[in-house]
Amino acid sequence: MPVLWLFILVLALGLIGFVLGRARALKDAQGDIRLLHSLPSYYGSNVLLATLIPGFAVLVLWLIVQPMVIHGQVAGMIPERGLTDYGSLNLAMSDVRRVADGLDIAVEQGALSAEQARDIRTEFTDIRGRLGEVGVALGSNVQPYVLQAAQTYRTMNATGHWLMTGAVLAAAIAGFAVAFLRTGKDLRARNSVERVILMLLLSAASIAILTTVGIVLSLIFNTIEFFKLYPATDFFFGTTWAPSFGGGSELGILPLFWGTFYVSLIALVVAVPIGLFAAVYLSEYAGPKVRAIAKPLLEVLAGIPTIVYGLFALLTVGPLLMSVFGDGGLGWMQGGRSVMTAGLVMGVMLIPFVSSLSDDIINAVPQAMRDGSLGLGATKSETVKQVVLPAALPGIVGAILLAASRAIGETMIVVLGAGAAAKLNMNPFEAMTTVTTRIVSQLTGDADFSSPEALVAFALGMTLFVITLGLNIVALVIVRKYREQYD
């Protein structure tokens, strides 16, 4: 049974449990709601949750464990010859899954029967040609061991799905039966439901925390492996970035961080004044009609994909800057890709982050503070400058910090607008690169993940994480210092 239909079936069983559980509680109370410990809906919700939670828990657990078990079993069928590393095994398993999916498609379209898909052999059939007839393209001829592994994969996958269906339905029905039989007018259904909801909320919070912990641990462990292969002093203080998978790499981080902060600085110089002034205008001066039109239009910028901004930088802003600062103008710029190109476009992208958040924060300043200032004879501009903005400063700092974090982590605009040159240079009209773009480039292609050229991506990510964490701490200290004046 497909997973979607299994999900719908368990959900339907839970809804039936809600109706029957509510009816059973009312029947036990002879229809008098005053005899119930809890409201009728709590009895139904108790059966609903008792059905859904075990069923969905088994479903999620099965979907996580089954691929791992099947992968381990099928991987053992791949001969060791020709497998040089873990990446080679992954490529072989990718071929196995592709052939298995092709056999499934061939059976669905009637090109092969289920028995033929199970018993077909490469010695007697052109597997690549047969699968090509049903629209499955394979890069090379199918090896016998790949076909056998794919057939085993299909068999185990089908068996696993049937077992999963039985286990999920059994867990859901068991939860339904236990909760339904316990339902009565004296059952503390509200306590049970609220306890379950509390556990669900705690689980959601734990998932977010554990995800963060997992990301940090992944960075730490791979960073440690990197520093076992490459000196930390050369990494942190090196001024040359020249990775080479043939050996002799120079992996100095300084050019990358210089490019990252240079682009981010230009972006913030563009975004912060414009965004902050726009927020002040919208919150303090604009009328309701203007605000209703201007703010949504401004926030549209936040919904534009970054690849579109990158193309805008490459095709519009870069040539425009070249016409002014290039060979036909001041002669400062050698190409359309530069720090200034990426910084200007990134600044435009960050404007809604600053303006929208700052606008909400400024609007949250109590109106009594404005009225008091105006009542003492201050002008509108003096009130904004000396009362509203200082009161909203902690939130504005947070908005600027969010924009800075967004700028530091941006990739596509930098790739298309700033180029890929890793160098230390003060000229904003020259091409440079950033940490995030180098992380992407180091982890793409046929990378050997045991080499320093691949592991350096984790070291770059860990260093960037530590720096942004430090910026957050500094900003938090500033926010608390100013907030004390208005508590």
Image: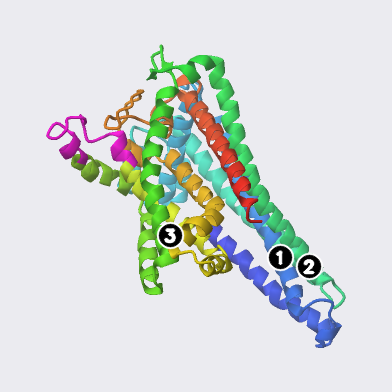
Q: Which residue ends up furthest to the front in the rendered image?
A: 377
Residue at 65% from the left image edge and 51% from the top image edge: 484
Count neighbours of disc 2 (C-alpha within 10 A) and say few if under 14, some if 14 to 19, many if 20 or more. Answer: many
- Name above or below for residue 443 compared with residue 293: above
The reply to whether callout 1 and callout 3 are in contact (CB within 8 Å) is no
Q: Is residue 312 left or right of residue 46?
A: left
Amino acid on which disc 1 is placed? Leu
**Circle 3 is placed at which residue position?**
280
Cα distance in 3D space between marks 1 and 3: 48 Å
Viewport quadrant of the N terminus: bottom right
Count neighbours of disc 1 (C-alpha within 10 A) and say few if under 14, some if 14 to 19, many if 20 or more. Answer: many
- Name above or below for residue 138 compared with residue 57: above
1 or 3: tag closer to the N-terminus: 1
Amino acid on which disc 3 is placed? Val
2 or 1: tag closer to the N-terminus: 1
Foreground mark, 2 or 1, reads 1
Q: Which residues are magenta?
A: 321-343
**Circle 2 is placed at which residue position?**
179
Which of these two is toward me, 183 or 195? Answer: 195
The reply to whether callout 2 and callout 1 are in contact (CB within 8 Å) is yes
Amino acid on which disc 2 is placed? Ala
Secondary structure under the numbered disc 1 in the rendered image = helix
**Circle 1 is placed at which residue position?**
49
Magenta stretch containing residue 184, yes or no? no
Cα distance in 3D space between marks 2 and 1: 9 Å
Residue 232 appears in the figure: yes
Residue 389, image x and y in percent? 50, 56
